[in-house]
Image (spheres, grey):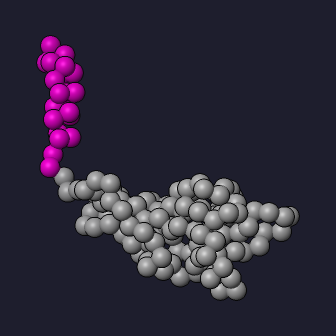
Amino acid sequence: MKKIWFILIAPFLLATQCESDEDPVFRTEYYVQNDSTIDLLWITDEDREFLIEAGARQFLSVASDSEAFISPSQSRGLTSLVLYSSTGSDNEVVYSQEDIQDELWTFSSSTTCDAEYVLFITNELLDSNAGF
């Protein structure tokens, strides 16, 4: 009989244990917003290819920390960013941040613990990055 009571009470006990006052987790997401007139190609370190069409947004990475949001240059999942032109058979590099430059990323916070950094790719940015 004791086992039956334990089986009935165990889910309640476990459910109340999950409602502790834990420290918040700050979640930071990183995106590329393609505001240029050309389609871009992003190739990850794992050789996965993502087409970022003109006008589209592409998720790059996410980071979390118990104390604060993480800037793009401090993110472990975002050590560099290279974008290619998706036209033609050869992938031509059109934008590169070998060392991530925080000042080029736009920060916005949607909630107390969720935020995002967005790199807006424009024709002007591509032109100024030519030849990097």
Image quadrant in which you'd find residue 49:
bottom right
**x, y (%) of residue 79?**
53, 74
The residue lying toward the viewer, choosing from 108 and 22, is 108
Q: Does the magenta segment cover residue 84?
A: no
The residue lying toward the viewer, choosing from 75 and 91, is 91
Q: Residue placed at 44% from the left, 77% from the top?
A: 102
Q: Does the magenta segment cover residue 13?
A: yes
Is 16 placed above or below 57 here? Answer: above
Quadrant where the C terminus sits is bottom right
Q: Residue placed at 59% from the left, 76% from the top?
A: 125
Q: Main secondary structure of the magenta part?
A: helix
**x, y (%) of residue 75?**
44, 70
Magenta region, residue range: 1-21
Which residue in the rendered view is the most extreme toward the right?
Answer: 89
Q: Residue placed at 19% from the left, 19% from the top?
A: 8
Q: Residue placed at 25% from the left, 67% from the top?
A: 67
Residue 72 appears in the figure: yes
